[in-house]
Image (cartoon, rainbow, N blue to C red):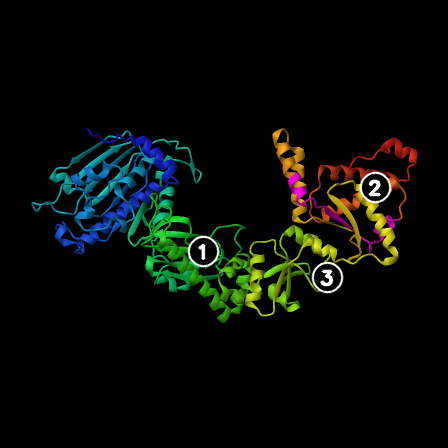
Amino acid sequence: MSRPFQVDLSGVIELLSRHIYSSPRVYLRELIQNGVDAIAAAHQAGAGVAQEKVTTLVENLVEPRITIRPATNNTPITFQDNGIGLTAAEAAELLATVGRSSKRDSEIGLRREGYLGQFGIGLLSCFMVSSDISILSRSRRVSPDGRGFPAIEWVGRLDGTFEIKELDPEQSELVPFGTTVTLARHAARQSGREASGESAGGDDLLRGPVVRELAATFAEFLPISIEVIGENGPERITRQAPFLAPLRNQWSEVAGYGREILGAEPLAVIPLDVPSTGTSGVAYVLPFAPPPGAAANARMYLSSMLLAERVPDVLPTWAGFVHAVLSTDHLTPTASREQIIAGEALTETQEAIGREITAWVARQAEQSPETLAELVSVHHVSLRQMAIFHDDLGRVIIPLLPVETSAGMMTIGEYLDLSPRVRYAATVDEFRQVSSIVSPDQPVINAGYSFVADLLLRLPALREGVSVEQVEVSKELANLSPVPFDDAARAAALEKSATEALGNKYLQVIVRSFEPANLPALYVADPKVIEWIERDSARDAAAGPWAEILSQAQEVFAAAGSNVKAQLCLNWSNRAVRSLASVGDEVVFLRSIGLLYAQAKLSGHHPLTAEDRTMLTGALDDLITLSMGLSDTSFDAGFGTDFPEL
């Protein structure tokens, strides 16, 4: 014998509050959506849609209206619409079965997907803020015998029980056509989350200021009248949407709304229309650069009802420099109606919006170079990614994009004016190492930032005669000038003595001549060296089986020829380095070379190891002592002659 599932309503509400809805604030959105559904159903029926299935309405529908009376100390919150209303049979079917859609859909020939809410599941959200829900409703339709249906009263409780009754004719006459929902207030229920600083299900969500804010947030652009009854009487919170036609052509309205949501004057406004998915609106070009890594999101309305303030995947990933406000009729929302379901329609919308934004940028290049220049100056990071995906646009934008070079900041176009031979360092670390030693007439571009390398590699296809090459630190170091022939012997001796003094198995000291002369030393380590050092350090720090595994892995790399070293390049053009070659005092030499090593690492933004810091501290202490002119005896007594192992 089959048996129906027994549903724990409290558990369902907990599931809704934790995993379906992002906040109990959505209760008001669900009520408004249900009211919109009821009004739409009444209008569709009254307009003659599927008349063979629809009985005559009791009275013509007046101006569609939703009225909200927030809770006070003495009264509960009430929500009233003048829509099609409910009969007793509809209420029993719709409100007592979780997830059931309305029978009236088939009766009046409407597709439920065209509406925003599903009365049954949407009404459950009210239990997140109320323990008892009362519904008083009077249907606009007539019964088969030609008379109107009696008004009904439905009461549901959080414990899962409900009552429904039909009112007598005299009582029914006193009930207005449509539906009135009353929510009984209760103390805040803990649902395991906070919503915008308010307790989930908190009583404040039913009171005047919050109710007015929520109604305006969710429904200010609905094409029906929504009034919130306050201390000073009714206040209409709905208005025309400035981001939709025809107001979209009125710059003052559109720009004013942009200032309202951005907090600043938008740089520009881009109209957006995707007829195939019923999506339209505007994209405001931000007057400021978005935070690094900020995703491209859109404020999204579903049939003019707010879906969410930040919906991903509607805009292309590169469109972070705009804030779009859109309304859609055909994209499908998720169960919570707070996001859009991914699919072909969403992809089509994203691609169409991308084409419109790209076309706008291209028009600025032709018609308004000043606007394009301002756009690039503010949003060059986002435009890098945009230029990668669009060849024609890339030809216009890429030369305008600024990049960091060893000769200072300049645009890519200015760099190409210096030389068609484009040289770049792939990482910020490599750029820092080579920027001080490369020739000024052949500067290196820092391609360690997002999409810079991708842009540079596209240059040969966009401009004839341009070549692009990646700079390798070790090769740049090898290209430095050797010391003069007369000094070669002293330089070789310095290389040997300095390497031995530092005693670092990962380090080799070399001597070259380069500019600027006031730079005494360079520490150079390509990515392979850094990887080797970090792997070896991990092996030394590991214990047990991990130490053995890492040791075996390191041996494999060593056998493959990966036992490479970093280089400390001393500058023979520097007076201090040349003097160091003549120092005979072991302590002075050791401490001096240690200081040069530490200075070179810090200048190149390389972290100091624990051994490096110990050596630096000892070198400073000893050199300060020597500079004070203390005797050897004093020095030995204070510091000793046993140098720490490096």
User: Which label sits on residue 439?
Assistant: 3
Q: Is residue 210 above or below residue 283?
A: above
Number of residues whose C-alpha sits closer than 10 Å to that of mark 1, classed few (under 14), some (14–19) or many (20 or more)? many
Distance from disc 1 to disc 2, alpha carbons, whole Å, reads 58 Å
Q: Which residues are magenta?
A: 555-581
- Does 587 sit left or right of 325 as displayed? right
Query: Which mark is first along the chain, 2 or 1?
Result: 1
Q: Mark 3: which secondary structure?
A: loop
Q: Position of residue 383 (x, y in %)?
A: 52, 59
Q: Position of residue 372 (x, y in %)?
A: 52, 65
Q: Residue at image x 14%, y 47%?
A: 141
Q: Amino acid at mark 2?
A: Leu
Q: Amino acid at mark 3?
A: Ser
Q: Position of residue 103 (x, y in %)?
A: 19, 44
Comparing 78 with 98, the one in front is 98
Residue annotated with mark 2? 590
Q: Is residue 638 visible?
A: yes
